[in-house]
């Protein structure tokens, strides 16, 4: 593993025997995931790459990492195999502790999350809601800095509540209903390319969701490391009626 560019910044907590596997994702996580994964969805593959880097960094620093705290995204799907992926990559894996949270979201969502009453007062503002798995919604590296893009186009981004995304029901109907109440009329569903559950259940439910929420225009946007971010930007512009 010495040939990998392993960042030890995030293993300081290893002195206490545990570390969180969800600091901000970066290019190195994606590069490592390409070396050891091939059939995972985009978001889970990058999380696997992050996990491998963290465990490897702890090992190379001579620290004993007993426990790894991991967000429970898609736990009943491919993430159940995360320990096996890490073991195959580097020969060992610490105990995994699953948590229903995604850190840093309050900072990411800013004033929108801090004061929803302000959103109600600005009901006439051009608002765009996003839904999808937590990493894609809240990690700028994974979603091509969608908040900055939407803001530059003159729209206000409305984030989902992070606690509502840790669910097997990928239709996220509670969030869609909330968007309607907040005056959102355009929604972008951020979907991790390769996510079978998303492709089968979410896309299959679009017709029904359109009937249930006629106020919303929902666009599904696939995120794939091998696809052009420019294409995704153009899709977003089309969804907002800007092309």
Image (cartoon, rainbow, N blue to C red):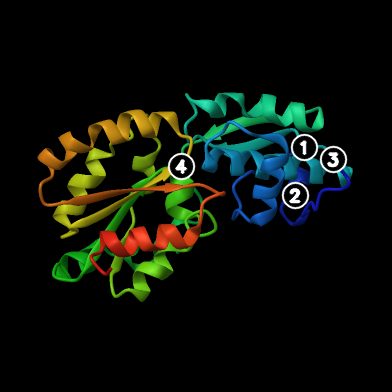
Crowd around label 3: few <14 · some 14–19 · many ≥20 (10 Å): some
Looking at the image, tell me whether mark 4 or mark 2 is earlier in sequence order: 2
> How far is mark 4 from mark 2, CA to CA?
27 Å
Looking at the image, tell me whether mark 3 or mark 1 is earlier in sequence order: 3
> How far is mark 4 from mark 1, CA to CA?
29 Å
Crowd around label 2: few <14 · some 14–19 · many ≥20 (10 Å): many
* Residue drawn where x is 15% and y is 52% of the image: 180
Under tag 3, what secondary structure?
Answer: helix
Closest to the camera, between mark 4 and mark 2, is 4
* Residue drawn where x is 47% and y is 32% of the image: 74
> How far is mark 3 from mark 4, CA to CA?
30 Å
Under tag 4, what secondary structure?
Answer: strand
Q: Along the horizontal axis of the image, is 200 left or right of 76?
A: left
In the rendered structure, are the residues bearing label 3 and label 1 in contact, judged by CB atoms less than 8 Å apart?
yes
Looking at the image, tell me whether mark 3 or mark 4 is earlier in sequence order: 3
Looking at the image, tell me whether mark 3 or mark 2 is earlier in sequence order: 2
Which residue occupies the foreground of this view, 111 or 183? 183
Which residue occupies the foreground of this view, 224 or 110? 224
- Please state the horizontal and vertical placement of residue 9, each as a whole percent of the image: 75, 57
The residue labelled by disc 1 is: 65
> How far is mark 3 from mark 1, CA to CA?
8 Å
Under tag 2, what secondary structure?
Answer: helix
Residue 163 drawn above or below residue 120: above
Residue 78 drawn above or below residue 130: above
* Residue drawn where x is 10% and y is 47% of the image: 214
Residue 11 is tagged as 2
The residue labelled by disc 3 is: 59
Quadrant where the N terminus is found in the figure: top right
């Amino acid at each position: 593993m010495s040939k990998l560019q392993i960042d030890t910044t995030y293993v300081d907590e290893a002195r206490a025997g545990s570390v969180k596997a969800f600091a901000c994702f970066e290019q190195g996580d994606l590069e490592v995931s390409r070396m050891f994964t091939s059939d995972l969805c985009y978001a889970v593959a990058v999380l696997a790459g992050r996990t491998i880097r963290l465990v490897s960094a702890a090992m190379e620093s001579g620290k004993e990492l007993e426990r790894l705290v991991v967000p429970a995204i898609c736990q009943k799907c491919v993430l159940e195999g995360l320990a096996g992926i890490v073991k195959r990559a580097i020969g060992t894996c610490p105990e995994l502790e699953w948590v229903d949270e995604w850190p840093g979201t309050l900072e990411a969502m800013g004033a929108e999350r801090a004061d929803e009453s302000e959103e109600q007062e600005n009901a006439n503002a051009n608002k765009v809601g996003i839904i999808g798995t937590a990493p894609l919604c809240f990690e700028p590296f994974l979603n091509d800095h969608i908040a900055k893009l939407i803001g530059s186009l003159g729209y206000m981004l409305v984030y989902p509540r992070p606690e509502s995304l840790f669910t097997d029901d990928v239709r996220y109907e509670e969030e869609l209903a909330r968007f309607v109440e907040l005056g959102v009329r355009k929604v972008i569903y951020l979907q991790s390319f390769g996510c079978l559950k998303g492709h089968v259940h979410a896309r299959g439910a679009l017709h029904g969701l359109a009937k249930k929420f006629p106020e919303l225009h929902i666009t599904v946007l696939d995120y794939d490391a091998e696809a052009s971010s420019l294409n995704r930007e153009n899709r977003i512009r089309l969804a907002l009626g800007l092309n």
